[in-house]
Every structure is written in C-alpha cells, then in structure tokens.
Amino acid sequence: MRFPISSVLVAAGAFAGTACASGPAVQSRPEVAAQGSVRELSADAQALHVLNRLAFGARPNEVERVKAVGVDRWMEQQLHPSRVPDATLERSLASYSTLDKQASELLQAYPPPGLVAAARTAGPESAADSVRRQQAARASRRFVGELLSARVARAVESERQLQEVMTDFWLNHFSVFVGKNQLRYYLPEYERDAIRPHVFGKFRELLGAVAHSPAMLVYLDNAQSVADSGRETQGQRTVARRGGRTRSRPAARRMQELQAQRARVAPGNARSPGINENYARELLELHTLGVDGGYSQQDVIEVARALTGWSIQPPRLGGDGFRFNAFAHDAEPKTVLGVHLAGGRGIEDGEQVLDILARHPSTAQHIARKLAVRLVSDTPPQSLVDRAAATFRRTDGDIREVVRTIVFSPEFHSRDAYRAKVKSSFEFVVSAVRALGGRADSTPLTSLIISRLGQTLYGHQAPDGWPEVGDAWMNTGAILNRINFGMTVASNRVPGARATSWPRYEALREAPREQQVEEVVDALLGGQASPETRDILRSGVNPLASREGPQPAFDMVDPDEDATPRARVRRPAAASPAGLAQIIGLALGSPEFQRR
Amino acid sequence: MQRRVFVKSGALALVTLGLSPSFLRRTVFASSLPAARKGKVLVCLFQRGAADALNVVVPHGEQAYYALRPNIAIPRPRASDTGTAVDLDGFFGLHPSLSPLARYYRDGIMAPVHAVGSPSATRSHFDAQDYLESGTPDLKSTRAGWLNRYLAVSGTCEACSASPFRAVAMTAQTPRILDGPAPAVVISSLGAFSVRAPDASADRLEAMYRTGTTDLVHASGKEMFDAVRMLKSANPLKYGAANGADYPRSQFGQRLKDIAQLIKSDVGMELAFADVGGWDTHVNQGGASGQLAGRLRDFADSIDAFVTDLGDRMDDVLVMTMSEFGRMARQNGTGGTDHGHAGSMFLLGGGVRGGKVHGRWPGLEREQLYEGRDLALTTDFRTVFSEVLTTHLGAGDLSQVFPGFAAIPRAGLGLLR
C-alpha cells in the first residue's frame, strides 16, 4: 500500500483557514499544520480510520463522503458538533418520553417496587401478589430501558459521531452503576446535564458537574459523608457568629437533620457517623491524578473532609439535584496536596479541591494518556501523550483542544495506529448496525445484546469503568458471543442490523460469490482482509447442506433481579443463513471486524 | 486427556507485538501450567439480595427469636409436622424447605456456619456484594475479585490446570468475584456454549482464526475454538443426571446441572460460580411457607440434585453458599425483614467436618445484637474463605488474595477435614 502525502498538505492548509475563524483553535494551529505533512496513511485509509476512531464505524458509502468533505475538515466539524445538523436522530429521539425528566419525576412515575409492595397489607403473599410485585419491579425499571435504547440510537444515528464517542468516553471515565440502590433515577439527568454539555468543554467544568451530580454523590457515597464527630462543622460556626448564646431555629432544625442523616448512614448507631472516603479516593485515583499521581492516604482523608456536606436533595420529598449541607461540613482547616485550606469555610473547600485537582500536572498526564489510549492505541507513544498533556495545561484543560492535538497528530494517522484497537462490545454492535446501514431500534433489545456481549451500559459495578484496552474484550466467552452475533445478523434476527437491510443486498444476492465477497470485504472490512479471511469467505461449501439448524443465540434474562434491569428477549423465527447473508455473518465474526 | 496450551508464542514475541501486560500475564499463566488432574473443585453459590439467615438456620432454642418475629418465625421442631424447623442439634434447625439438606448434615458432610459475614457496617446491597466479591470489606478500590486473585497467585502451582475451564461462571456476565487478570470462562448455559452456525460456517470461522497472525484477536479466537472443541469432545451434555437426581427446572437448578456436567466431563474445572436472586424479602416473606420458603425450596432441591447427581465425586467437591449480609433480627411492619448484618453460610462436600453448626453464636438478646437490631458477627467471611482455599484447594500464601487479612495469624474454624 502506498501512502501519498501530497493531498494531506493541501488539506492541512485548508484546515488552517477554518481554525483561524474558530478563535480558540489558533494556538494549536502551527502544530497541526506541521504534523499533517507526515501522515503515513492513504486518503482512503485516513477516512476509514477517522470513522473507526472518531465515529462508531463507517456506514455504507461514508468513506467516500468523508473523503469528499476532506478528512481534516470532517474532523474539524466533528470537534464542533453544534455545527453539524442532526435531524434524523432528533426525529428518532422524539419518541422517548423520559429522557428529559428529573429524578423526582421518575421516582413518582416509576416508583420502586419496595414502595409498591409496602402499600399492601400484611399477611402471606399470594401468587397474585407475587405477580404484581414482579410487574411493579419491571415497570419501575422501564425508563432505564429508554435511556439505554437512546444511548444506542445516538451512537448509531447521530451525525455528531465524535460527540457520541466522547460521551461514551466520559461516561466511562466517570462511571456510575445502575444497580446501586436507587441510583437509576439519576441516570437520565446525569448523562443529560452532567456529562453531555461538557464533553468538549473545560475539564474543570466537567469535573464540577460530576461532583455536583446526585448520580456520583450517591454512587460513591459522598451524599452520606458528614464531618467526623468531634470536628467543628460549618453549621456550628454559623451559630457561633450569630452570637452563640442559643441556637437559632433553622440551626436547631439542621442539627436534627444531621442526627437523622447520621441515623440513615448507620441506622441504630448515631454515635459513629463521619466522613466517607469513597468518592475522595476515586476522585484522586480515577477521575483526576491517576493511581500514581502523587497523593497520599492523608490526601484522601483531607479531600473527603473538604467534600463533607456535598449531598443531594431528597427526591422522595420532591427535591432534585445538589444540596450543600453546611451543618455536615467539616469547617476545620485542611491541607490538600500541600495546599492549605483555611478553616471556617463551606462549599468553597470542595470547589478549591476541584480547582487544585483539575490543574494538577498529573491530571493533565492522566487524562491525556487515557484519551490517547481510547483514540490511538493501547500503548500510545509517550511523545504524543506529552504533547496532549501540554495542550491540557496550556489551555486550562480544554478538552476540545486536547482531542484536537491527538487527532491531528502524525501518531494518530500512523500505520502503527491503523486498526490497532480492539472494539468494545458497544463499539462492535453499533459498528455492525452502522456498517449494514441499519437503524437504531426503539426498544432496549440492542442494548441487551450489547449486555449479553459483556458490556451492560451503566452496568459496570466497580468505579473504574470498562477497560479501554483490548485484552479485556478478547476472551473465550466474548469472542464466541461475537461470532454468534455475526451469525444472528446473518439470519436476520437482530433488529436494526439485518443482513438484508444492507443497501447492496438486493443488487448482490444473485451475483457470483467472488463479487459478493469483494463487496462485503470492501464495505464491512474496509477492503482489508487477510488472504486467509478472503479465501475462507470465498470458499463455497453449500451451507444449505448443513444438518444443524440455527438456534437461539442469546439468553438475556439477567439472574440478578435485585440489581439490574431485566428483560426477556423474544426471538423471531429464523431462517438458516445462506449465500450473501452468510458471507456478511462470517465477515462480522471475522478477526478483522473485531478491530477498529 | 490431552490439554492444549493455548498460546504457544513466547513472552518475548508478545512483547514485541505490543500487547498489553495483563494479556501477557494471562498467557504466562496459561502456558506454564502442566496438565490437570482429576482435582478438587470449589463451587461458590451466591444468594444475591441478602438471605434471611435467621429463618434459614433457625435458632429455635432462643426465646428471643420468637419474641422478635411473632409472625414469621419458624416454629420449633416437631417431628411429625413438616411446617416446623428441621432440628439439627437441639438448638438450631433448618427451614423446612431445606429438609433435603438435613440428610447431608446427618451424614456428616454438611455444615452451616452461623453469624458469619463481612465486618463492614454497610447495609447497601451494592456495597456489601462488592465487598463479598472483592474480598476487601470497606475498600472499594480493589479491582479484581478474590477468586480471580486466587487464580492469579496460584497460577504457577503444579496441581493447577491449564484448562480454559479452570474457572467457570455460570452467569450472563463476568461476576465481580471472578473479574480480573486471570482468565475465566463465562457461560450462561452449557448448551449454548458452541458456535451457533451451520457446520460449514463454523469451520470457516475457525479457519479464519487459526490461520494468520498471532495477535490478540487471533489468539483469543484460537483459545475459544480450542475451548469449544474441548467441550465438544468431552461432551458434558451426554452426562444425564445420575443416581435419580431430579434438578428443578429453574435457572439455578439448570445451572447446577451444567456445573455437575462440567465436573463429570473432567475438563479441568477448579472453580465454579453461580448466583441466584430473590432474597431481598422486605415484604411478606412468610414463615414455614410463603415467599422465602419457595425460594429456599428451589435452592435446596437444586443443591440436593447436584449432590445426588455427583455421588462419590462429592469427595472432591465443596459447595459453599454465601449472601451479602443477613437481615434484621426483628420483623418489620410489612411482614418482612430489612437489611441486617451477619448471616449464615453452608458448606457441603466430602471434605466438610459436617454434622455441626460452626461459628460462635452471639445470641439475640437486645444487648447481644449488632447496633441493637441485627445478628452480630463472630466470624469474618475471609476466615471461611481462607480455610477453604487452603485446606480444600491447597492454596499457599493468601496475602495477595486477602490483603491485610491473611497476614494476621489466626486459627481456622476447623470446617474441613
């Protein structure tokens, strides 16, 4: 393969013009222009590469469309999603009714099954009661199905593909778990208000939105973190400033609230509440500095103290969103990463901690590396990570600029990076739907298939999120499920991704096998299949002669009914995949399609 | 039986391919291990949702038990009455739905452990399940599950198997307890663990992965086809239930049947895991009959069928049940029980020092309860886990499996022979 570079020079020049007009991009322009001149990939390969990395794979004819726009211009558009019209997706999303709801509204509309059951009178539960209870449990999770379905729909249909890739990245970086207590009610607002508005914004704003989000405050328990007994709280200071003789009525009420909160934290044991370090620890280790980012256990404790009182409005009382409880805030002095925080302060303690963390060089390095791992390779060159981290520091954590540094780098457009990433299950399924020109399905079914392939959206229990590196996605069970998914698509049993929905299907179904293989390899595997894969797709044992009929490929009843949304998948009757459909199925199950 | 070594490339070759370290580690495990013997098997069964230990292993000798649970207590044993506790030792009894297991207690191969669990004070399902599976109570940042850490540290021991089926989760997704760098196979049903394609397509898919390069994707694919092939030749499905064992049709029953088939087909399985939900009985849990009774019946009938099916093979098999915490000693206002603290476990197998309820009983008087409301904890679950790993599976140093715990020398409970 040849790697012409002349056209790239022209493209980089054209890009420089648009960057000037866009303002903040000016700083990174010279760097981009200089790097654009040494790209190793052909124009076709570049177009496919950006669709694999900055989008969820190519749709039919999309490589041609990107080439027509110009790879650099396309990337620039993707970095500014508001400039990309997205009418098709907006029409699809119009049918969803819960995406714009607040937690309190969802709690009212989809009450937890415990409340429904508790409304019953005592006595042994009859069979009918049991059915009602299970129905209530399912109903209480229905809105989660909408959220999952919408995630898939956006990834499949949105023209703002890089925005969806970044949303996936940041939701994973700030991972929360749907199965924790009542957290699911906060998920729609978490994705909508905390993550999406900031995926190309300043890191500090994103970090702050997450820190104020009920989803994260509940997930990592900060909502329950109160000053250790013995520490002076801000509530007490307020009282003291007011004269300190008697407690004012609101202050007295707050103290009662604190007692009640302590009782909730440790029922029956109001004597030993105190700080909860969970959020503080993950904030340092996962969200900002990184595990080797240079903090101590004492820093974890000090950060936890600074964040005491960062809590939530109780949604059952009709409240929504963040609440700072001064009465629970440890108002004594603290030292975080060597920075002294004076005593007597309130919410500004936590805000200053977020400032310190967002601007720490370890954070720049950690975020730059993680983005490079997502976008470039499992082992990105240190030189690239360093440049992206430098951009992070220079722009005060401007995510758009950090991403720009990465995606316009020669490392990104290098032969080493090309197809170097293994698809996550989400990427695998969504890219298959897109490759076949399919539509998003309005049911949670596709998200359940993704779940069955090992990646339940919002279903990662531990706070570290799904792995960004390939080996986690390649194991015995996972690859078997992927191969079986390909065969399921071949027999038209995946809604939205049917072999017959591929635009070329009708034209090719009677074509010679040789031609079918060539077009499938071109469209689904980017024209690049190993000689072995190509031979095998070509080899023509008549599959109709097979004895073994198709079988259900997915068993999607989740055993853990106490923790996760569940649904039963109805399987349409299937025909045995043959001919062109079989080639498509084999291609989706091939080693080549597992890469992006 | 011949065991395949799945990735034959040397470590150096993998490094030059730029593969990530955890894949490398896993490959080293896989390639440095000798053939498996017909070895010991540990079967972990997780009751998700917090099973009500006081109605599972019933302290019928406690007056306070009946005072705390006027409507849902299990009546004291009466031999002729199947709606009463099945007496074990004059003080404890089993819920009547668990009567199939009483036989194994009398045979000396089954033992409950009472007042056992996590020392964490949490009453959150999520947190407590997390701690039970990570093996590090109150420490959320632990990434791998403790069964996976066991696999990792014992990966080079001589007796360990190189089988892809060394650790099997009969679940839809990798459970936290088996998550981590060491490989584990996740199978939602044995009948479904095959390439769902007409033979011709399956052969072609296999050829695609067998030919060509030795990168991560191909290596995983080869490993998968080896596993499928191995399972096909071992053909576990040919082992019908033996000795008249009758598995319930429930998902849990069928998964235990699958585990028994894997054991009988000698595919080198050392660890098996399955879970079962429905234990979160806040409302109308019932007593000798009702909601919890139904759950326990399926649980006991499934285990009974498993033990019956395996027959003498139970000499090498240990079944260990667990749940994230127990439930409040006092019944609540809706005929159920709220989240509590200590719980109970069952150990069942030829190596168990059975016929005895293990663990110190803390009592149910108000001052004896944890925070005035729950069964107090007298045995850390890691004590039980450590003894099982050491005595049953022959594990050595557990300091990596239970960091901060294994270093403290302590006597086991004498649960196993």
Image: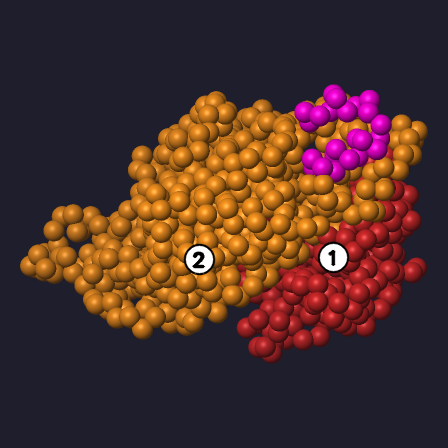
Chain colours: A orange, B red
Residues B55 and A478: in front is A478
Residue A31 numbered mark, or none: 2
Q: Secondary structure at mark 2?
A: helix
Tell me if residue A88 comes above or below residue B60 in the rendering.
above
| Callout 1 amino acid | Asp
Left or right of A560 in this view: A464 = left
Host chain of mark 1: B
Q: CA distance from mark 2 to mark 1?
A: 34 Å
Q: Estimate the x, y position of residue B251 in percent, counting from the top left.
A: 72, 39
- Residue A224 visible: no
The quarter of the displayed image where residue A337 is located: bottom left
Tell me if residue A253 comes above or below residue B118 in the rendering.
above
Question: Mark 2, mark 1: which one is toward the viewer?
Answer: 2
Left or right of B119 in this view: A454 = right
Image point 27% across, 50% down: which residue? A324
Q: Majority secondary structure of the magenta segment?
A: helix
Residues A128 and A538: in front is A538
Q: Is residue B141 magenta?
A: no
Write the start and end of the magenta stretch as one range: A502-524
